Image (cartoon, grey):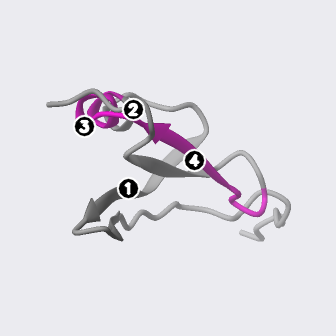
Amino acid sequence: MENSAYAIGQAVFLRTDTPDFEEETIPFKTLEEMVSICSKAQPNLTLEKIIVYAMADGEPSALTLGFISSTKGQRPGNLEAIAG
């Protein structure tokens, strides 16, 4: 596989340490780098999607792989006492 000087895609993570679940993107230049980024635990981040870019016949295109995740409990900032 040819080594690119430019990013061929990005991993998009959701920040779980903020109330609004902000996105944080990490670009990658090779598929090996993508695997490394996505297979390691990222503190306070949950993988949401992977976007891979390509140029086919002079036309830009992208493939997006989305992931579904869920969390238990309430979002930070909306904490209320639960009456038992």
- Judged from the image, the secondary structure of the residue bearing numbered disc 2 is helix
Of circles 1 and 3, which is in front? 3
Could you tell whether 31 is left or right of 64 in the image? Answer: left
Label located before the other in sequence (2 or 3): 3
Which mark's residue is nearer the viewer, 4 or 3? 3
Position of the N terminus, as image quadrant, is: top left
> Considering depth in this image, is 50 or 61 the residue closer to the camera?
61
Q: Is residue 59 left or right of residue 56?
A: right
Magenta span covers which residues? Answer: 19-36
Query: Between residues 21 and 71, which one lies in front from this camera angle?
Result: 21
Q: Position of residue 11 (x, y in %)?
A: 45, 48
What is the distance, in whole Å, between disc 4 and disc 3 at their CAs? 16 Å
Distance CA(mark 1)–CA(mark 3): 11 Å
Name the spot of residue 6 as percent of width and height, x first. Answer: 45, 38
At horizontal 78% and vertical 59% (from top left) the residue drawn is: 19
Q: Which residue is pictured at 51% across the width and 60% down the height?
A: 71
Residue designated by label 2:
37
For disc 4, the marked residue is: 25
- Assess whether mark 1 and mark 2 are in contact (beta carbons under 8 angstroms): no
| SS for callout 1 | strand
For the residue pair 58 and 31, the one nearer the viewer reads as 58
Mark 1 — residue? 50
Q: Which mark is residue 31?
A: 3
- The mark that comes first in sequence, 1 or 3, is 3
Mark 3 falls on what kind of element? helix
Q: Residue 75: x and y, percent?
A: 71, 63
Q: Which residue sits at x=35%, y=57%? A: 53
- Residue type at mark 4 is Thr
In the rendered image of this protein, does residue 33 appear above or below residue 76? above
Image quadrant in which the C terminus is located: bottom right
Between tags 2 and 3, which lies in front?
3
